Amino acid sequence: MLLVVGSVALDSVETPFGSREGALGGSATYFAAAASLLAPVDVVGVVGDDFPLAQLDFLRERGVRLDALERVPGRTFRWKGRYGYDLNAAQTLDTQLNVFERFEPRLDARTRKADRLFLGNIDPDLQLRVLEQVERPRLVCADTMNYWISSKRERLLELLPLVDVLMVNDAEARQLAGESNVMKAAAAIESMGARAVCIKRGEYGALLVSGSQAFLSPAYPLSNVVDPTGAGDSFAGGFLGLLDRTGGSDLAALRQAVVMGCTIASFTVEAFSLDRLRNLSLSEVRSRFETFRELTDHEALHASIR
Amino acid sequence: MLLVVGSVALDSVETPFGSREGALGGSATYFAAAASLLAPVDVVGVVGDDFPLAQLDFLRERGVRLDALERVPGRTFRWKGRYGYDLNAAQTLDTQLNVFERFEPRLDARTRKADRLFLGNIDPDLQLRVLEQVERPRLVCADTMNYWISSKRERLLELLPLVDVLMVNDAEARQLAGESNVMKAAAAIESMGARAVCIKRGEYGALLVSGSQAFLSPAYPLSNVVDPTGAGDSFAGGFLGLLDRTGGSDLAALRQAVVMGCTIASFTVEAFSLDRLRNLSLSEVRSRFETFRELTDHEALHASIR
């Protein structure tokens, strides 16, 4: 069973292709929508009493368990952002933690037994408190961001040895490692304790580094990218969802999981909010996954090159 | 036989890892150094009487024919640039055309019979005048840049129907097509007449688009990038060099050529100027080429995913 701890949010997003006010968002939401196509998911999080719970019905119908999603008095976590034509760079206009400010994750008997865990981008203190409650997870993935890297560095350094795969973008990896070269940064993060580092590169795909091994998946080439919000969290959902479904944990399984992450994220960005994930089917996912090999496939060198 | 028309230059470059003054550079130089590892190359270009011709001896030793490289009174083309930690973005500090201002490419009986042609990033007027002189080339590749796209757009539009593969970066493709999505931009450039578009993405590799087909090669993951100058031109050299050597021209051959381009470019950036290309051997190239399949190789989905 798969467990995600993260935000369930209301997002206001502006891109060159339109805008949305107070739309469904949050790292746990995107993760669960993606992962639940492949495996059962439990969500730990919090929303305020302004949250339109009916918007999560599609997750319940997909088998997502929301018993550990608390509803408390106050306003739901809200994020407001804008993207220009360079959709790889979000500009945060406003972040309101609201009910997340006093959030204290509480795992029940069931969620404590989670096999695989995604620690969404929240305070490393909370990430650590979740890890303390999980009994014996087989795989732990964590996300973080520039804000925590600078303000909670010590706690992050406590977290890293407990993490199997740290999932960050290029800039976060560089900042955490204090090293501009991404390969050196990944090696430095491994030496801080993470077993592997997965660098999310938006429209350029993802890079997985573990020891001397590097694996690269391109992003699926899209003619129609509308809103990149949630791409990273649905990448994580596809990644962990596939590992939970197949039970694999070796490097070959991680490679396949990276491609699944890129596959599902490529659907996410085709529409605002969770609009594309909401109606996504496993057969659509499978069919796009299978095209990834063709994207990078090429002939070995002719004998004439020897 | 392979022909390149482009600059032979003296570059002054600053990166976070050091600097060089008046070092060997230029699009034709990088192209020839890369391509000559794979096939015979002729260079058409011009240098001033200040140019240290002995610096090209290593090219001659590799079989590069420099008979059509004119030496005229005046100063050689000079470029001065700077890179920050984001090595994907060069800042041009100074460009002196010098002897290039009155350059008039003249092909002799031999070079007119070139099979494959690289039109380096020069004035589209000059690129067109070279094309007029070549008798029956089997493959024409061309590079261009923002300056020509805005100042010589009409001439570029005359050139495109004569070009098999246009090689540009993301920003140039977007500017030429007036379209922010790269896949749509590539399709628009094809509709302007180019048979295929190759988008060079620096540390993110390269994308080849032809009709409904897309091929992606990652860049080779490097821990040590010193100077990205010349990466695009040595990419073109590896690309055309392999096609000239193998004689292929179908999409499978172009895919393999993209990987060869990425392979040789990955050596170029490991040192300043042409320092790494100068001593590069074909066996080193072959060995790195063969690792590209491992970089992207992954298992198909298990039956459980059906």
Image (cartoon, coloured by chain):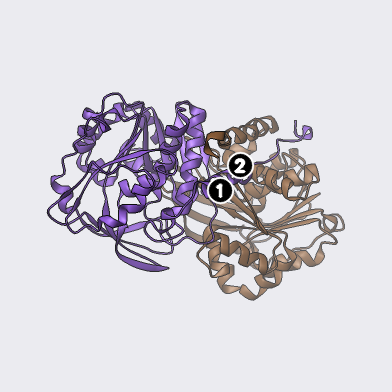
Chain colours: A brown, B purple
| Image position of B234 (left or right of A194) | left
**Dot 2 amino acid type:** Arg
- Pick the front one: A133 or A262: A262
Residue A169 in the image: x percent, y percent?
56, 57
| Image position of A130 (left or right of A301) | right
**Residue B31's image quarter?**
top left
- Residue under numbered circle 2: B293
- Look at 52% across and 47% down and name the residue there: B285
Determine crowd level at label 2: few under 14, some 14-19, many 20+ residues with C-alpha closer than 10 A: some
**Dot 1 amino acid type:** Arg
Q: Distance between the residues labelled 2 and 1?
A: 10 Å
Q: The residue tagged with tag 2: helix, strand or loop?
A: helix
Of the 4 image quadrants, the one containing the N terminus of chain B is: top left
**Residue B141's image quarter?**
top left
Determine crowd level at label 1: few under 14, some 14-19, many 20+ residues with C-alpha closer than 10 A: some
- Look at 36% across and 58% down and name the residue there: B273
- Residue under numbered circle 1: B288
Residue B258 in the image: x percent, y percent?
47, 39
B2 is higher (above) or lower (below) than A31: above
Q: Which residue lies furthest to the front in this view?
A: B61
Of the 4 image quadrants, the one containing the C terminus of chain B is: top right
B88 is higher (above) or lower (below) than A60: below
Let me know if residue A121 appears in the view.
yes
- Pick the front one: A129 or B277: B277
